[in-house]
Amino acid sequence: MKTRDLTDLVLLGALWGASFLFMRVAAPAFGPVALIALRVALAAVVLTPLALAAGHWPELRRRAGAIAWVGVANSAVPFVLFAFATLSLTAGFAALLNATAPMWTALLAWVWLGERSARLRVVGLLLGMVGVGVLVGDRVGLRADAPAALLAVGAGLLATLCYGYAANYTRRYLSSVPPLAAAAGSQAGSALLLAPLAFWLWPATTPGPRDWLAVLALGVLCTALAYVLYFRLIQRVGPTGAVSVTFLIPLFALVWGALFLGEGLSPGMALGGAIVLLGTALSTGVLGRGRAERSGTQ
């Protein structure tokens, strides 16, 4: 990987890791739905002109329904679920749950698309489930806030399941659509879907400047700019290289949470997170890829 691509990868990990920090900051003030409505609307405002300038309007118009559906599955629903989760979970913990997304993608590709899964990938999926169990046990345990924490964990896992579904749907039905067009259209579709709900659920108390700055950073930096970086990485280093950002996101989220919110890292979180990341590496083929290539399997 070239230095420029490595820089993009690290910056992308830092931005997506920071998204959990910004959601943790702004979700209590705006509420999950209003916060995410603003996030996707800002991203759409930035990405749509770029897509139009690139000449993607015919594709956006022709595949509007499918692109909008991807927006629901890949942005509107999972973003709201994670914003809800950050009301009860730390930024680092939520990011560790986010690391299970590639595992759901691999599992659904196996069940839905009939994609063959090597034994190492199956082991990775099982390891990931064990890691989630360790995380849940550490966060919930016998604490008084166990029901709220368990509900938040469930929301986070449902969000990553949505990511897995959206990735496979895109692969099956939108593989010919330019990535920038899919990104812009999906954010615009998400914004249109969430706008009436956000109006209905708008907070009674006006959020402060700190909350608005978090929303601005979340929409422009962690969504619009991050998508541009992500699709550029896919074009230059391929999907497998781009998905390695999964391993950087929790690390950055933990660092940002510790620096700006005083969040800590418990031994259980460290152990569970390590197991989840190992499972993700195996299930996505990042580990064992050389062996698979030598044997001619995928």
Image (cartoon, rainbow, N blue to C red):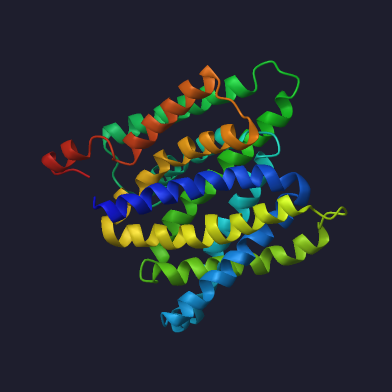
Q: Is residue 9 left or right of residue 131?
A: left
Q: What residue occupies the far right of the structure in this picture?
A: 204
Task: Give percent across and percent down for residue 200.
Answer: 82, 61
Can you say whether 155 is above or below 225 in the image?
above
Can you say whether 117 is above or below 127 in the image?
below
Mark yes or no: residue 74 visible.
Answer: no
Q: Is residue 65 left or right of residue 275?
A: right
Task: Give percent across and percent down for residue 246.
Answer: 42, 43
Q: Nearer the viewer, residue 62 or 48?
A: 48
Q: Nearer the viewer, residue 131 or 165?
A: 131
Q: What residue occupies the far top of the structure in this picture?
A: 142
Task: Give percent across and percent down for residue 20.
Answer: 58, 43
Count of numbered circles in the view: 0
Name the residue rendered at 43%, 51% in the picture: 12
Q: Is residue 208 left or right of residue 243?
A: right
Q: Nearer the viewer, residue 215 or 39?
A: 215
Can you say whether 57 is above or below 249 in the image?
below
Mark yes or no: residue 108 visible.
Answer: yes
Figure quadrant of residue 119: top left
Q: Quadrant of the C terminus?
A: top left
Name the residue rendered at 53%, 34% in the picture: 254
Name the residue rendered at 50%, 50% in the picture: 15
Q: What residue occupies the far left of the structure in this picture?
A: 294
Task: Give percent across and percent down for residue 222.
Answer: 53, 54
Name the residue rendered at 42%, 46% in the picture: 105
Can you say whether 223 is above or below 290 in the image?
below
Q: Is residue 168 left or right of residue 200?
A: left
